[in-house]
Amino acid sequence: MKQRIVVGLSGGVDSAVTAYLLKQQGHEVVGIFMKNWEDDDDDEYCSTRQDFLDAASVADVLGIEIEHVNFAADYKDRVFAEFLTEYQAGRTPNPDVLCNAEIKFKAFLDHAMRLGAEKIATGHYARVRQNPVSTLFELLKGRDPSKDQSYFLHRLNQAQLAKTLFPVGELHKTEVRRIAAEIGLPNAKKKDSTGICFIGERPFREFLNRYIAKEPGPIKEPSGRTLGEHQGLSFYTLGQRQGLGIGGVKEKGVPRGGGSHEPWFVARKDLATNTLWVVQGHDHPWLLYQSLQADKASWVAGHAPDTGPQVPPDAALAAKTRYRQSDASCRLVGAQADQFELLFDQAQWAVTPGQSAVLYQGEVCLGGGLIAAARPWAGPAAT
């Protein structure tokens, strides 16, 4: 059936092909360009003006209307304020997760409904289906495993999924590029954005320092020896290797760390003493974890998996503790409406407070939460 569908046109190729596919299906398509950041807008890192020109060019080629909408105040209040609060508390947030929940599928969705939309659509690589048995809407991984973005969408609820379409989630990126080139879209070869949601690709520490004051402190290794000085715990994340300022430094001709030439990694952040702890070697025990506790949980079905029929007790579950990670087999323990614990079969690397732990059953994303704490790896038999 023909529907009025509002598409979030970002200026990128994915949302452009999304709009094209929907129009080909006979729908009434309207584009909306979201402006969500105004500080130092349109400098070399934040190209809102160019993105809008690209989105407008796409709309012109496709023959659809486009509206420019400013959500900057919503973004600052709902996303960026939380982003800064998390960093100041020593955690490492994922702004894309919060941005999707609060802006793209809340502020944008509300605006689209006011325009008379029956559905909204974005260029995310994910899928939505309605379970024929439970009638619940399910969030599925995108067909292209290298581009799947369900991790960033795990906070979406039933009401949001019922109104959402992800057309390119059925395609691989190479096919999206091919379609864009075939129909002559002006942004067919435009590079994908990989920066902070709506803020762009910029020197991160320099950007964060505008909003969070530097509080230098010692960098120490497990023996307690001081190796250098950090610029402030907020500027570092667990597992970080680059930008520590201690690589290759020698004391009396011997590499710091007692002669080992292995790289240094951030392993712990002690807010009480303002100490950054680092270790040598990717597989150092301080970087390996057995389990995690998560809070601020959000379940796609509206309730925790172990309280409903959609996940059998013996279901094989897996989780991601960061976006660029393979699914890790795990057990779900004590799942509640707002918190849960995950026990992993194999050691998990650099589990980071503030990041999202997202739970899957096969291709179905069940939801997730913010990592609050993690327990060190104690071997395969530990529970």
Image: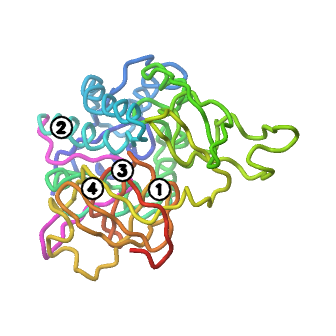
Q: Is there CB contact under 8 Å for labels 4 and 1? A: no
Question: Is 332 drawn above or below residue 152 in the view shown?
Answer: below
Which residue is under mark 2? Answer: 112
Whole-number angstrom distance, CA of label 2 to CA of label 3: 21 Å
Label 4, label 3: how far apart the Cα atoms are: 27 Å
- The numbered mark, 4 or 1, whose residue comes first in the sequence reads 4
Q: How many marks?
A: 4
Q: Which amino acid type corresponds to the residue marked 1 in the rendered image?
A: Lys
**Quarter of the image with the C terminus in it:** bottom left
Pointer 4 residue: 25
Of callouts 4 and 2, the N-terminal one: 4
Q: CA distance from mark 4 to mark 1?
A: 24 Å
- Three-letter code for the amino acid on which mark 3 is drawn: Phe
SS at circle 3: helix
- Assess whether residue 366 is covered by the magenta stretch: no
* Magenta-drawn segment: 115-136
Residue 77 at x, y percent in the picture: 26, 27
Q: Callout 4: 10 Å neighbours few (<14), some, many (20+)? A: few
- The residue lying at 45 percent from left, 43 percent from top is 13
- CB under 8 Å between callouts 2 and 3? no
Residue 239 image point, x, y percent: 56, 49
Q: Which mark is residue 152?
A: 3
